[in-house]
Image: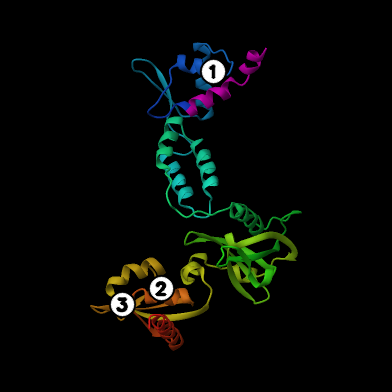
Amino acid sequence: MAKKSNQKIKLLYLMKILLENTDDEHGMTLAEISDALGEYGIDAERKTLYNDIEVLCLFGLDIDKRKGKSVTYHVISREFELPELKLLVDAVQSSRFITHKKSNELIKKIEGFASRYEAQELQRQVFVSNRIKAMNESIYYNVDKLHSAIAQRRDAINRDAKIAFQYFTWDEHKQKKLRHDGKIYRISPWALTWDDENYYMIGYDSDENKIKHYRVDKMTKIQPTEEKRDGAEFFADFDMALYSKQTFGMYGGREETVTLRCENKLANVMIDKFGFDTAFSNITDTHFDMRVKVFVSPVFLTWIMNFGADVTVLSPESVKDELTALAADVLAQYK
C-alpha cells in the first residue's frame, strides 16, 4: 500500500534525485534513477521513466540526454549557476555580522541549490580563518525587524511607526554598557545600509530634527511603538550612497564643504572614496584641488592625517584648526 501511495509523488522524487545527483559533468542512467527511486519505495519501469522525464522537461527542468557508453541524463541549468552560488558563499563567509554558526547554516542551505558534486566544490571553498565574526545572532533578527519596520507594513504588528530601542557599547571589561543610562531611543526608521563590514539603520530623530544612523549590532530590545513615523520629507530624495560617502566610518559629525589639495598620486584613492563625479581643479604636474561635502569627525580628521604631507586642508579654517589640535594631541602623547 505504501508503494502505491508513493507512486503518486514519483515525479517529485524524480526531480529531487536529478537535481541532487546530476549536473553538466555528472549524469545518471535510467537504471541508476530506478534504483534511487526504489530507495524511496517507488517502482519505476524504463518506459514510464521516459515519460516522466519528458514531463519534467515540459515543466521547465533543463534535462539533457547524452549518448555514450550508456545513455545518461543531466540537469544542465539551475536557478543559480555554480559561480553565483560561490559568490553567495563568499558573501556569507565575509559578513562580519553573521556568526560562525549561522554562516554554516546559511552555507548549507546554499548548497541545496547545487548538485552534491557542486556542493562538494562549494565546501572546498569554505575554510576556517581568523576572520572576526559576531558573537551572537541578535543582529540577524534585528535586521529582520528593521526591514519589517522600514517596509511600512500597516498591520497589527508593523504599522508605519517609530521604533523604540536601547543602544549599547562595550566597556573596558568587555561588558555591555547601555548608552545614556539605558535611555529608550525613539526613532523613525527609513533605511538600512552596509558600510565598512557593519549594518547601520538610517532614521529620523524628531527631538533633534535630524537624520541619524545607528549600528544595528549595537541596538537591543527593538520594538514598534504607537507613534507614527515621521521625517518622510527628509528621505523623499535621500541619496544613501552620498550619505555613506560623506560619513567617514559612519561616525557622526557636522556637515562641511572641505577643500583639499592632494598629490596627483592620490587621484585614484580620492575617486574611490568620493566617486568619479568629484570635480578636480587647479590641476598641476604635482597636485590637484577638490571640494567635497563631508561630516567632520575625528575619523575624518584621522583619515586626512593618514596621508601625511600628501593631503592639505585648504578650507575652512575651522577644520584646519581641528586638524592642528588633533595632531598636537597625538604628538603630545609621545613627548
Q: Which residue is mark 1?
A: 37
Q: Which mark is residue 310?
A: 3
Q: Main secondary structure of the magenta part?
A: helix
Magenta stretch contains residue 18: yes
Range shown magenta: 1-20
> Which of the two labelled residues, at mark 3 and mark 2, occupies the earlier sequence position?
2
In the rendered image, residue 187, in percent from the top left (x then y), is placed at 66, 67
Q: Nearest the camera: 198 or 236?
A: 198
Distance from the alpha carbon under mark 3 to that under mark 2? 12 Å
* Amino acid on which the number 2 mark rests in the picture: Trp
Distance from the alpha carbon under mark 1 to that under mark 2? 63 Å
Asked if the residue under mark 1 is in contact with the one under mark 3, i.e. CB atoms within 8 Å, the reply is no
| 15 lies left or right of 288 | right
Name the residue rendered at 53%, 22% in the picture. 14
Magenta stretch contains residue 122: no
Q: Quadrant of the C terminus?
A: bottom left
Local SS, label 1: helix
In the rendered image, residue 28, in percent from the top left (x then y), is placed at 43, 20
User: Which mark is nearer the camera, 3 or 1?
Assistant: 3
Q: Which residue is mark 2?
A: 303
> Which of the two labelled residues, at mark 1 and mark 2, occupies the earlier sequence position?
1
In the rendered image, residue 286, in percent from the top left (x then y), is placed at 24, 78
Can residue 62 be seen in the rendering of this structure?
yes
Local SS, label 3: helix
